[in-house]
Image (cartoon, rainbow, N blue to C red):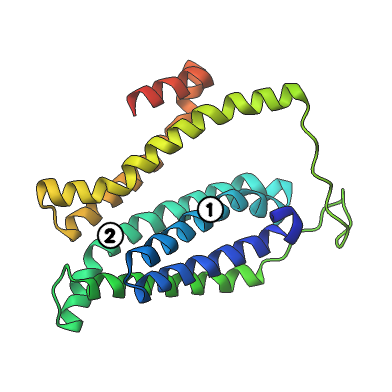
């Protein structure tokens, strides 16, 4: 999709649909509706994740990309940290303003609507980003055709895909229920949950920054195997 309509347009489309799914989940109280919008959220989030790196690469010069990716990662880390904190403390604030319970559907709905509005605002800077000119292509020239994979390349791709697919299935079965587990099993409040997930974001960021140093000492394959075993 990104190669057909452009990665910036893909990000714009995914962000708008994601914001619409969040707002739709607030407007439709039925189980089927919630599942449908949750499916849309997952698909759009995957679309945004896949399109992000090519978009950053085509919107910058080669000399800028290392710094740009580093800055982008740092910004995402801080945004995730403060977003998790806000998600923990905002329900109580909205509950106080709406005069409802801190764990009532109305309080959570208000937080989701605020998140939807933030996604809509994120569209504005995307509209101002222009594709960087490259000496290897004309500014308005056609995109290169999608290359065909050889049998050997397809085999390597399959070997890389299988472990990632298994990890994805495991993460999909675990991560969405972490907050439910802490809340039901230990009675953790929303604010404390926000702090826990904010600390998780910081820990993930620190581990990612330490990754190159560990890989240089142990090797890339050993580092991947070790970190997955520890996980």
Q: Is residue 229 left or right of residue 12?
A: left
Which residue has dot 2 on it?
Answer: 85
| Residue 60 can be seen, yes or no | no
Residue 5 screen position, x and y as percent: 73, 61
Q: Is residue 6 left or right of residue 48?
A: right
Residue 97 screen position, x and y as percent: 19, 82
**Residue at the (26%, 46%) spot, across then down:** 178
Residue 31 screen position, x and y as percent: 33, 64
Q: Secondary structure at mark 1?
A: helix
Q: Nearer the viewer, residue 123 or 67?
A: 123
Distance between mark 2 and mark 1 Cα atoms:
20 Å
Q: Is residue 148 left or right of residue 111?
A: right
Q: Residue furthest left?
A: 187
Which residue has dot 1 on it?
Answer: 72
Q: Quadrant of the C terminus?
A: top left
- Eyeballing the image, is 173 above or below 79? above
**Residue at the (10%, 47%) spot, across then down:** 186
Q: Secondary structure at mark 2?
A: helix
**Residue at the (24%, 61%) spot, across then down:** 88
Q: Is residue 58 left or right of residue 79?
A: right
- Eyeballing the image, is 161 above or below 37? above
Q: Earlier in the sequence, mark 2 or mark 1?
A: 1
């Amino acid at each position: 999709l990104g190669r057909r309509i452009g990665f910036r347009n893909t990000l714009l489309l995914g962000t708008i649909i994601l914001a619409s799914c969040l707002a739709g989940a607030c407007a439709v109280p039925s189980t089927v509706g919630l599942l449908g919008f949750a499916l849309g959220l997952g698909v759009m989030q995957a679309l945004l994740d896949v399109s992000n790196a090519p978009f950053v690469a085509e919107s910058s010069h080669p000399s800028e990309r290392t710094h740009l990716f580093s800055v982008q990662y740092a910004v995402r880390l801080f945004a995730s940290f403060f977003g998790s904190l806000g998600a923990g403390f905002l329900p109580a604030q909205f509950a106080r303003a709406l005069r409802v319970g801190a764990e009532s559907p109305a309080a959570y709905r208000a937080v989701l609507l605020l998140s939807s509005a933030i996604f809509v605002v994120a569209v504005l800077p995307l509209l101002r980003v222009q594709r960087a000119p490259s000496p290897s292509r004309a500014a308005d020239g056609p995109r290169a055709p999608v290359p065909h994979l050889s049998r050997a390349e397809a085999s390597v791709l399959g070997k890389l895909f299988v472990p990632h697919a298994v990890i994805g299935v495991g993460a999909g079965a675990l991560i969405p229920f972490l907050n439910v587990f802490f809340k039901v099993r230990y009675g953790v409040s929303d604010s404390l949950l926000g702090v826990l997930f904010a600390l998780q974001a910081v820990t993930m960021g620190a581990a990612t920054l330490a990754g190159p140093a560990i890989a240089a000492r142990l090797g890339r394959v050993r580092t991947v195997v070790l970190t997955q075993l520890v996980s």
